[in-house]
Amino acid sequence: MDKLFNDISRRAESLDIATCRKFDPKLLVPEQRIRDLCNEDKCGNYGKHYMCPPHVGTLAEIREKLSRFQRGVLLQYSEPLDVRNDAEGLVRTKLDFHEKILQLEGMLNDEGVAPVWGMIGGSCELCQPCLAATGEPCPHLEKARMSLESVAVDVIALLDRFGLDSRFHADRITWTGCILF
């Protein structure tokens, strides 16, 4: 694991990912209270994104999928950004982080590591609008990724557990995701 983690850390650093921490996937506990926030649909994605609830499965299904993984790497990507006034910048940085997760997954696959499950920050933005709204199939199944939030993980508590900054900043966006293997 140490050589593999070092390889992942070096690759993450080359992708300008500021945080790369190994962890036990058992720390990812889907919670009903987090799923309830999704059910309230304050972000407007509930049922309208294939990578958001209810399309991502029940909490029991997510727990079962999480149980298949023994290792994880928590990742954070930050950029200076006027978070309140730069909607295009938010989407651009989210897509940048998504691509970085895919590259790290690819690196692991090239090393013969399988299965690999990458999770991004926020909701998938590969298609706008997501075709889930119309019931058409996702054209990017090989690239679309769920977020920690969409699988009902309390990201703030997870970051606090790692001693990482969990606050929102008006002048900087930080996306948090992970890769499980």
Image (tube, grey):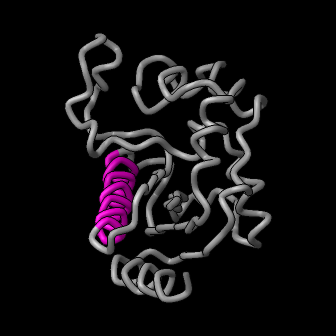
Residue sitting nearer the eye, 137 or 78: 137
Kindly identify the residue that appears in the image at 54 percent across and 28 percent down: 43
Q: Position of residue 60 (x, y in %)?
A: 68, 29
For this orientation, the residue located farthest to the top is 134
Kindly identify the residue that appears in the image at 73 percent across and 57 percent down: 27
Residue sitting nearer the eye, 178 or 58: 58
Q: Is residue 27 magenta?
A: no
Relative vertical location of residue 155 with respect to residue 41 in this rendering, above or below: below
Give the magenta part as a residue range: 88-109
Relative vertical location of residue 127 with respect to residue 78 in this rendering, above or below: above
Is residue 27 rendered to the left or right of residue 71?
A: right
Q: Position of residue 142 (x, y in %)?
A: 26, 43
Is residue 31 rendered to the left or right of residue 47?
A: right
Where the N terminus falls, by quadrant? bottom right
Kindly identify the residue that appears in the image at 44 percent across and 68 percent down: 79
Kindly identify the residue that appears in the image at 54 percent across and 76 percent down: 20
Tell me the chief SS of the magenta region. Answer: helix
Q: Quadrant of residue 128?
A: top left
